[in-house]
Amino acid sequence: NAGVMQNPRHLVRRRGQEARLRCSPMKGHSHVYWYRQLPEEGLKFMVYLQKENIIDESGMPKERFSAEFPKEGPSILRIQQVVRGDSAAYFCASSPSGTGYTFGSGTRLTVV
Amino acid sequence: GIQVEQSPPDLILQEGANSTLRCNFSDSVNNLQWFHQNPWGQLINLFYIPSGTKQNGRLSATTVATERYSLLYISSSQTTDSGVYFCAVFTGGGNKLTFGTGTQLKVEL
């Protein structure tokens, strides 16, 4: 079991470009969560998804951010028209039943 | 929303020393996890501990849910223990984690 796989590990985007972050959950895990960690801070919840459904997106910014977890393939966190304030580490986690998270290694997004 | 406070915020230890990290939370929780974020940024799950005590090698954790706190014990610390330790609590429907403020640990030779 390869654990939660995130890619890319590092992503550099210019202001106004789109960023796509991918997360493959652990085998057998149907719950996926995205968290954001700003520099020198703890992680903040963004969104919780199950296959083809968004369960809780209360932590997602209202504009430019979207997430999906299709029936086939990884979960995608998409940030449109990135700004410098989007620079952060984005972590994905998965669980088999809604508790007991395992986190991926994160994607470090830098907006220049 | 729930508040999760950790203490101390920073800690420097000599290799071999023991330490206790504390996590206080302001409301009832469904569950609690401890994580170690190493200097490379990776988050390692240490314990999933809603109540009671668990041990894993040199680490152990105790959660007293009725008194709204959890403790993480590190014995015989090593330089590889350096990093940030987070506790995080499950709230609401039990699917969302609220992270604490973290304890930055540095273990020196």
Image: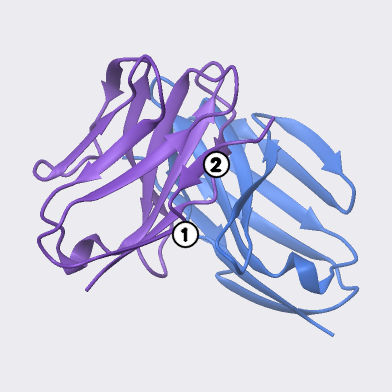
Judging depth in this view, the residue of B18 and B35 nearest the camera is: B35
Q: Residue at x 32, y 35 (%)?
A: A76
Judging depth in this view, the residue of B24 and A79 nearest the camera is: A79
Task: Please tell me the numbered disc located at residue B101.
Answer: 1
Left or right of A89 on screen, residue B38 = right
Neighbor class of circle 2 (other Cα within 10 Å; few <14, some 14-19, many 20+) is many
Residue B101 location in percent, x, y?
47, 59
Nearer to us: label 2 or label 1: 2
Say if A49 sits above or below B38 in the image.
Answer: above
Q: Which residue is drawn at 85% across and 41% down?
A: B55
Q: Tell me what hue chain B is rendered in.
A: blue
**Chain letter, purple in picture:** A
Residue topped by disc 2? A103
Image label count: 2
- Amino acid carrying mark 2 in the image: Phe
Judging depth in this view, the residue of B21 and B47 nearest the camera is: B47
Name the secondary structure under disc 2.
strand
Q: Distance between the residues labelled 2 and 1?
A: 18 Å
Tell me which chain the residue with mark 2 is part of.
A
- Amino acid carrying mark 1 in the image: Thr
Quadrant (top left, top right, bottom left, bottom right) of the N terminus of chain A: top right
Residue A36 location in percent, x, y?
36, 51
